[in-house]
Image (tube, rainbow, N blue to C red):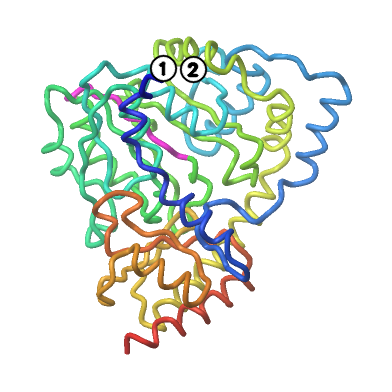
Amino acid sequence: MKEISKTVEALKPSGIRRFFDLANTMEGVISLGVGEPDFSTPWHVCEEAIQSMADGRTHYTANKGLLELREEIAKFHSEHYNQNYDPKTEILLTVGGSEAIDLSMRALLNPGDEVIVMDPNYVAYEPAIRLAGGVCVPIVLTRENEFKLKADDLKKAITDKTKAMIINYPSNPTGGVMTEADYREIVPIIQESGIYVVSDEIYAELSFDQAFASLSQFEEVRDQILVINGFSKAYAMTGWRLGYILANPTITKALTKIHQYVIMSASTPAQYAAIEALRNGYDDVILMREEYLNRRNLLVNSLNRMGLNTPMPHGTFYVFADIRPYGLSSEEFCNELLNQEKVACVPGDAFGPHGQGFIRISYAYSLNHIKEACVRIEHFLQQFK
């Protein structure tokens, strides 16, 4: 047989899934690795999907998705985020945010185009760039700068070959955020360079300590921004696989062209469920966010008390704990913690070389699981004292 694609062969397996799979082979493991809400999808949302099937609404939708849903998305983003998009020409429903990332890279890139990524960053960005023929150019984010993107670093990273940049705030894995003032410093650079920015805002509703901000709110660069969002995190709808992209009409047309060939349309029952979520589910979002906030405070305070230096995340449901004083690599630390105490976390370097020295811990789990995990982590750390 002929060999498979060299590009695919060179891709590394996801470090997140690797530790998740390891944890599943052991009994009694508390897994704080995967970023999936432990909440079930609110029942009224499920009921709407069930009713849609009972009514026979099980056929393909338009490639872009149900117009009714796109109208609800446009309304939601206008009211909550001051982002204004035309539901007919600027919104595309996708199979989760993951398809949206892939579509964005394939629609924007020619072979050899450079894409700026943050380091550390979410694990799916760099593979999507490489599969589309692009070249990754990292910007190192530091704890000292609260894992924010700084204007000077962006200026240095842009070249004549730069086509786009991918950002994710609130950030997976760091929990870092960008404020409106932070974005204002980089807007002139984006405008002058003409690059596109793919802004993954899937954790927008999980902003805790300040109002969520987006580059798309700046009119001077609005048409250069592709906003990715979805229903997985805020509405506890991970398994429904429904996301969306907001972009100018020219880009949306290109995205839809790819989408119609590889997907056709997103799941019809999931789209009806999402309409219900947007119309009547915001109270559910608020309740879940309050619970995440309680978990965050418990986890961060507990980890710092036991000596595991952990900055306070201002969004998402992750902490990025600093393990550098313990003399182990991120992978060694996670392996030993799993083997000795049966607590699964994710090595920081799964998210890029400069995640080395950190571990990502998810608090998308019950308070009881988090409390027991903290007892085990504290016991594990005793050997270093």
Residue 326: percent from left, percent from top: 28, 77
Residue 336 magenta-highlighted: no
Return the residue nearer the eye: 87 or 105: 105
Q: Earlier in the sequence, mark 1 or mark 2?
A: 2
**What residue lies at 28% left-to-right and 32% top-to-bottom?**
165
10 Å crowding of disc 1: few (<14), some (14-19), many (20+): some
Q: Which secondary structure, mark 1? A: loop
Residue 201: percent from left, percent from top: 45, 39
Q: Hey, what amino acid is under mark 2?
A: Glu
Q: Are marks 1 and 2 in contact (CB under 8 Å)?
A: yes
Picture layout, residue 250 above or below residue 161? above
Residue topped by disc 2:
90
Question: What is the CA distance from the residue labelled 1 to the residue labelled 2?
Answer: 5 Å
Label at residue 248: 1
- In the picture, measured across the screen, residue 335 lies left or right of residue 282, that is left
Q: Which secondary structure, mark 2? A: loop
Residue 55: percent from left, percent from top: 88, 21
